[in-house]
Image (cartoon, helix red, strand yellow):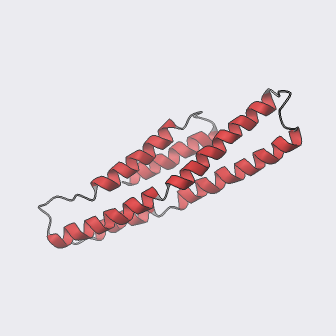
Amino acid sequence: MLPAHTNLLQQAERIDSGQVAHFDFLQAQHLELIRHARALQHPPTAFSGERRACLQDGALRLLQEVMLLELPLADYLQARAMLGVIAAHETHPAPDSPSAATLRTLRETQEAAAEQALQTLRDAPVPETAALLSDCPR
């Protein structure tokens, strides 16, 4: 579970640094997190009832945490897309392009939005919630 969350953050960092110009891998990592969290809701039937219940409760909580990443991810991707549009206007101004001052303000706003969304992704309690699963009785 943790590698998928780490990979999600790494993909966001790659987008942020300009190493990757598309969002496919970031979105794929989020889907992978969802898939893992859903799979954890079905522990082996050989486990004791107490352990199965603990794992299922933890997996449900984990799935909720993973699903809560959807909005910060959408905010991040929207801000990064808008930064691309702003860069295009700065690099190749058109007659209807906003002024340089307006573009600068828009860029600052979108950079702040992207950073805030990225920080929300970093601060998500997914690793802590996933670690709780190891506390279930054996």
Residue that lies at the very extreme toward the front in this rendered image:
96
Q: Position of residue 77 (x, y in %)?
A: 59, 44
The residue sitting at 48% across, 38% down in the picture is 25
The residue sitting at 47% across, 64% down in the picture is 125
Query: Is residue 64 placed above or below 87 in the rendered structure?
Result: below
Q: Nearer the viewer, residue 10 or 101?
A: 101
Quarter of the figure with the C terminus: bottom left
Query: Is residue 109 placed above or below 54 in the rendered structure?
Result: above
The residue sitting at 50% across, 56% down in the picture is 69
The residue sitting at 59% across, 35% down in the picture is 19
36 left or right of 67?
left
27 left or right of 38?
right
Q: Position of residue 64 (x, y in %)?
A: 41, 62
Is residue 27 something that shows in the picture? yes
104 left or right of 23?
right
Question: For residue 18, what is the image quadrant?
Answer: top right
Q: Position of residue 135 (x, y in %)?
A: 29, 71
Query: Is residue 65 placed above or below 136 in the rendered structure?
Result: above
Question: For residue 63, what is the image quadrant?
Answer: bottom left
